[in-house]
Image (cartoon, rainbow, N blue to C red):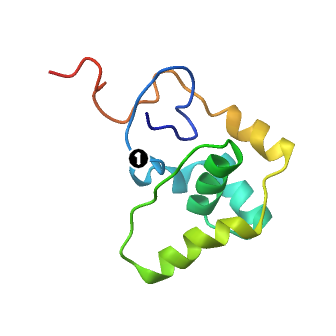
Amino acid sequence: MTLRPGFFAGDRVDRGPLGQGEFPDNAVLRVLAEKHDRTVAQIILRWHVQNDLIVIPKTVNEDRMRENLDILTFTLDADDLAKIATLDDPEGRMGPDPLTFE
């Protein structure tokens, strides 16, 4: 099961934790990134870690690898997590439903 901000309730399944790059334009995540002086991707990865979710970001870029590890140097507060929770959308799937795809 893959979860990400905007698609994280119940037994819904979707693609990668960073939502195939759709999140840099999300106002809530941009504000949180600015607040913490991080990237939107780091906010998303940190959200996964703080929700005790296993996240496996895929990259071959050394700078992004360092960025990914840097998520362990900050935390999102309860208000941040509440703001991200408002993004949940039952129709937020980014591709066909793998449970019904033929």
34 above or below 52?
Answer: below
Determine the secondary structure under disc 1. Answer: loop
The amino acid pointed to by label 1 is Gly
Image-quadrant location for residue 93: top left
Nearer to me, 7 or 23: 7
Q: Which residue lies furthest to the top in this view?
A: 100
Q: Which residue is drawn at 68% across and 47% down?
A: 28
Q: Quadrant of the N terminus?
A: top left
Examine the image and state in which quarter residue 58 appears.
bottom left
Which residue reaches farthest bottom?
A: 62
Q: Locate residue 73: give its quadrant.
A: bottom right
- Give the answer, above or below, for where 37 lies relative to 46: below
Question: In screen coordinates, is 26 left or right of 31?
Answer: left
Residue 44 locus on image (x, y percent) = 60, 52
Residue 78 or residue 34, whichever sits in front? 78
Task: Residue at 53%, 41% (x, y): give it.
Answer: 4
Circle 1 packing at 10 Å, graded few (<14), some (14-19), many (20+), is some
Give the side of residue 91 with respect to residue 82, left or right: left
Q: Is residue 84 above or below residue 25?
A: above
The quarter of the rendered structure image containing the C terminus is top left
Reading the image, the residue beneath label 1 is 16
